[in-house]
Amino acid sequence: MTVDGPGTDPASSGPQPYEYVIIGGGIHGTCLANYLLAESGHTHQDLCLVEPREQLLASFATKARQCGMRTLRSTFVHHIDTEPFSLESFAEGADREDELVSTEDYLSRPTLKLFLDHARYVINRRDIDDCHLQSRVTGVTRTGADDLLEVQTDAGTLEARHVVLAIGLGGPRTVPAWSTSLPEDAPLAHVWDDEFDPTTAAEFSGQTFVVGGGITAAQLACSLSEHTDVTLLSRHDLEFELTEADPYWINWRHIEQEIHTLPSGSKARLDRIRAVRNDAMIPPYVERRLNEACDCDGLDIRRGEITSAYATDDGLLVRFDDGTTATNAQVVLATGLDPVPEHPVVGSVAESLSLERGADGFPILDDRTLAWRGTDGTRSAVYVSGALAEPSVGPFARNIVGARRVAERLLASRQGPGSERAPSAARGRS
């Protein structure tokens, strides 16, 4: 069955192929759609943004609230719009400059509410919702005619000249082995579970343990500690760093020199990127929240890990690696998600279209255009954004600025070689 997507012209003889089908309606997919509408000459009839949730950015907004995020780690020049100072102008126009939070030795950062309100403003101004098909993608295949791709969804099949995978870090949750044998009704949750409700978790009568050592665990522990006693349990000493990597990794020329000179698909690329990413590190403004929560006696920070857990009538009985135990406990895991190359759609697309994968299963991309390379060495009509693009985009690939870089690469590739836009003033400042 071929589905009439959101951009179908009812006056035409039938559904027309989309120029782009974008898989994923999060930060990356929405940012890319906005760029294509604003700067490429494409219309809403050319684009289809497939996202299973009712609203674009709903997954990001839900996750941000689940973990207790107050402000973004990214600065005010990083957002889904094309103009670097769009968010700042939006804040000034709404008399909300106080929601641009001052950051020592760095540009100001927006509050979560300001960022989301600005994103909704951009979506409404550009009518991006008109491109949204609420459905889930199950596969991508070739049509066998006119070099088109068929995108299978729960609502039917779409035809496209180009497909962009912007699926984000939405794969299975990473959980410790001791948690897998607990009954479903045990007081155990993962912060990224769709059904996780921090309000309900805060009402638990016993001890709460948040397991994890990065920014998500820290924000969650601070948020829950406002309502109940919490212990943040980390396997390592907490480490602190303002940004996910040094800001010069935002510069495309630096990425070309430091990453693209290494072999495509190589482990050397991944090692280089992982060496400069500040993974599992907490920014100073969250460190201050941790210190304040500890001073208020609502939070304890403990180094160690749980080795076993058993369900009882009063909660969990947990045993730690130092031999001590805790009773009447609930555990909330903030232990991340499985690597994005393990996402089922990635494997399905690679197999059905004979696309090449490199170290750790990452797509092998054309570094200039971010097109996924076929096993025959040719450039396919499938592009990737987000964490999947990390071997080509670098350590900020999964961040908001990474979405903007992918959009710029894709626009440049449609205009031909040598058409890359010059870095903006905002990029120089950041």
Image: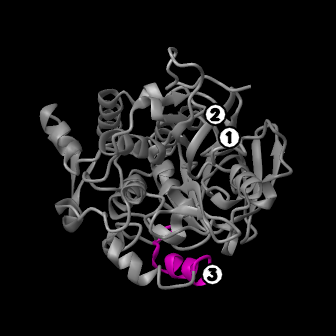
* Alpha-carbon span between mark 3 and mark 2: 35 Å
Q: Amino acid at mark 3?
A: Lys
Compared to 372, does 254 lie above or below?
below
Q: Are marks 2 and 1 in contact (CB under 8 Å)?
A: yes
Mark 3 and mark 1: span between their CA atoms? 32 Å
Above or below, 119 relative to 283: above
Image: magenta residue range = 264-280
Q: Quadrant of the N terminus?
A: top right
The kind of residue tagged 2 is: Leu
Residue 115 in magenta stretch: no
Q: Which residue is mark 1?
A: 150
| Identity of the residue drawn at 55% across and 80% down | 269
Residue occupying image coordinates x 62% and y 36%: 159
Q: Along the line of sight, which residue is nearer the eye, 117 or 325?
A: 117
**Frontmost residue, 390 versus 72:** 390
Q: Is residue 277 magenta?
A: yes
Spot occupied by residue 353 in the image (x, y as percentages of width and height): 72, 55
Q: Are marks 3 and 1 in contact (CB under 8 Å)?
A: no
